[in-house]
Image (tube, rainbow, N blue to C red):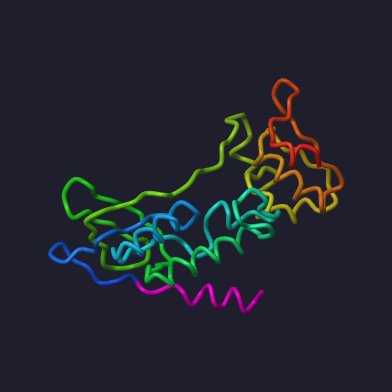
Amino acid sequence: EEEEEEEDGALFSPPPVSSAAAPLRIVILGGGPAGLSAAIYAARAGLSPVVVAPAFGGQLQGKGVDVENFPGVLEATGPGLVARMRRQAAAFNATMVSDAAVRVDVSRSPFTITLGEAEAPLYARALVVATGADSRWLGVPGEHEYRGRGVSSCATCDGYLYRGKDVVVVGGGDSAAEEALLLARTSRSVTMIVRRGVLRASRSLATR
């Protein structure tokens, strides 16, 4: 596993040099399945895509349970599946940049992408935005104040804090069920709060 992580880390490169006069052909924001799929197609078309995404980020990267619904893959974790996609994209000469876009100007061509760590921006003729989703918070009193002090949106990130404790998961879809299954490994009990008393998760998750 450590060797795989080292190999995956070796895929990342510094941001390529570009300018308004000599822009990149295509930049892809996001390193999850959508972004890496776009990178593979663009690379095979000879467009030399540049994928901009933090090496550690992405929802699939944070899944501690097995990925069971990806076609053609029988056994894989989220990080393992992302690592395979990265290697496949890199094999077709896609460039991986471990950084985050903090500003994008699409008011004129070429587009300008400002990165969080690099001094120089990237210029691109085409831009694919595949930045995924974010956590859906409840918006209830105390939710913001207690984030990190008992309230969390990521069982993979914070589950160890609740080892041996009684925890509650709000939601009845696949994401909530995956979090509950992960917490059940270490927590004393896991209670799911769902609307209308119906668990909407897929059958493979709900029956566990």
- Residue that protrudes farthest toward the front in the picture: 72
- Residue that protrudes farthest toward the left in the picture: 21
Residue 173 lies in quadrant: top right
Residue 2 versus residue 121 in the image, above or below:
below
Range shown magenta: 1-14
> Does the segment drawn in magenta span residue 17?
no
Residue 24 lies in quadrant: bottom left
Residue drawn at (29%, 51%), measured in percent from left and top? 104
Quadrant position of the N terminus in the picture: bottom right
Residue drawn at (51%, 63%), measured in percent from left and top? 85
Q: Position of residue 72 (x, y in %)?
A: 60, 56
Q: Nearer the viewer, residue 88 or 105?
A: 88
Residue 92 versus residue 181 in the image, above or below:
below
Q: Position of residue 18 (x, y in %)?
A: 22, 68
Residue drawn at (69%, 35%), measured in percent from left and top? 201
Q: Position of residue 178 (x, y in %)?
A: 70, 45
Residue 174 lies in quadrant: top right
Residue drawn at (62%, 79%), measured in percent from left and top? 3
> Does the segment drawn in magenta span residue 3?
yes
Quadrant position of the C terminus in the picture: top right
